[in-house]
Image (cartoon, rainbow, N blue to C red):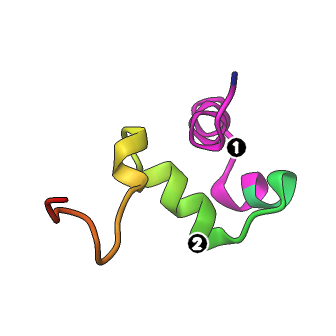
Amino acid sequence: MWTYRGLVHELLASGHSRRAIGRQLHMTSRTVKLFADAATPEDLFHGQWQGWSS
C-alpha cells in the first residue's frame, strides 16, 4: 500500500521537482512541502492537541 508521503519521496528521489509533483498529484505546493519535509509518518501529526496526556 502506498502513501502520499512515500509517493512524494519516491518522486523527489527520481528527480521530479516539488512543483511537478504538485501538478501530477493535484496537491498545493504547501501540501507537497509538508509531505516532502516529513521524514516519518509521525512527523505529519501536529496541532494543538499533540503532547497532551489522555
Q: Which residue is identified by label 1?
A: 16
Where is residue 5? Give x, y as percent. 57, 42
In this picture, residue 33 sits left or right of residue 3: left
Q: Which mark is residue 26?
A: none
> Could you tell me which residue is drawn at 58 percent across and 72 percent down?
30
Most foreground residue, 44 or 9:
44
Of marks 1 and 2, which one's residue comes earlier in the chain? Answer: 1
Amino acid at pointer 1: His
Question: Of helix, strand and loop, which one carries label 2?
Answer: helix
Specify the amino acid type for callout 2: Arg
Where residue 23 sits: x, y (%)? Answer: 84, 60
Q: Residues within 10 Å of mark 1 (few under 14, many from 20)?
A: few
Q: Is residue 14 magenta?
A: yes
In this rendering, the count of numbered labels is 2
Q: Is residue 9 left or right of residue 23?
A: left
In the figure, 17 relative to 47: above or below?
Answer: above
Other-residue count near label 2 (Cα within 10 Å), few / some / many at <14 / 14–19 / ≥20: few
Q: Nearer the viewer, mark 1 or mark 2?
A: 2
Q: Residue at x 75, y 64 (%)?
A: 27
Looking at this rendering, what residue extends furthest in the top direction?
1
Residue nearest the viewer, comparing 5 with 24: 5
Query: Per the image, is 42 magenta?
Result: no
Residue 19 vertical placement versus 24 (above, below)? below
Q: Position of residue 38 (x, y in %)?
A: 41, 48
Decide whether the magenta segment is chiefly helix, strand or loop.
Answer: helix
Q: Which residues are magenta?
A: 2-21
Q: Residue 22 or 2: which is nearer the viewer? A: 2
Question: Please, which residue is most extreme toward the front here?
Answer: 54
Residue receiving disc 2: 30
Look at the numbered disc 1 and give the secondary structure of its residue. Answer: loop
